[in-house]
Image: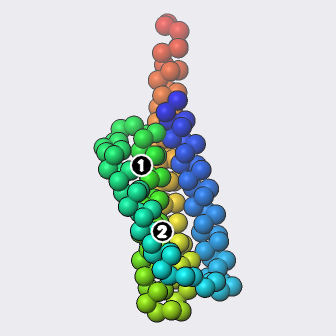
Amino acid sequence: ATSYAALINSSFLLLATLTVAAEAVHRLSVGAPSVHGLPVVIVSAMAASAMIVCAFILGNVEGDLNMESVMLDTVADAAAAVGVAISGVIILATSDTYWLDPLVALLIALVVGYHAIRLMRRVLSDLRQRSALQEIRDAPDS
């Protein structure tokens, strides 16, 4: 059941990442709307702090695919918040580099998407191995 939960979680993460990437590409192509840097920095810094604390609470999750998917989701949220905070600081300092916001979103989406696909492959491999072992156990003795 934990492998299926990891597969569902990583699938939803990939879907969300593809949606963010598509919106980022759209905003880069038609022009990014203005962004108020200070609120972006404050909210993103708070969100990043919360997600980093959550990652430390989760601790070492190696070997449990479901918990690895939760950690990936948490770290992806933290990375996104840090990236948004950094772009918010730059936008605040320059007053007109609004294109930076969708660019950072696209870069984060690419990194998170890569890791979501990698986790999905590991989960599918694990499920295939378990299925093969079950078939061996269920095979009649000859």
> Is residue 50 depicted above or below 65 in this figure?
below
Callout 1: SS: helix
Left or right: residue 19 compared with residue 124: right
| 25 w.r.t. 56: above or below | below
**Residue 74 seen in this snapshot:** yes
Q: Would you name the residue on which mark 2 appears?
A: 43
Q: Residue at x 53, y 14 (%)?
A: 138
Mark 2 secondary-structure assignment: helix
Residue 109 in percent (x, y) is at 52, 66
Type of residue at label 1? Met
Q: At x 46% / y 86%, what residue is drawn? A: 92
Q: How many marks?
A: 2
Residue 109: numbered disc: none
Left or right: where does residue 108 sit relative to residue 60?
right
Alpha carbon separation for disc pair 2 and 1: 21 Å
- Compared across the picture, whether 13 is left or right of 82 comes to right
Q: Given the image, on which type of amino acid does mark 2 rest?
A: Val
Instruction: Tell me what residue is drawn at x 53 percent, y 20 percent.
Output: 135
Say few, some or many: other residues with alpha carbon within 10 Å of mark 2 (under 14 / 14 to 19 / 20 or more): some
**Residue 41 falls in which quadrant of the image?**
bottom left
Residue that mark 1 sits on:
71
The residue that appears at 57% across and 55% down in the rendered structure is 14
Percent from the top left, x then y, of residue 4? Answer: 55, 35
| Whole-percent x, y for residue 20 in the image | 60, 66
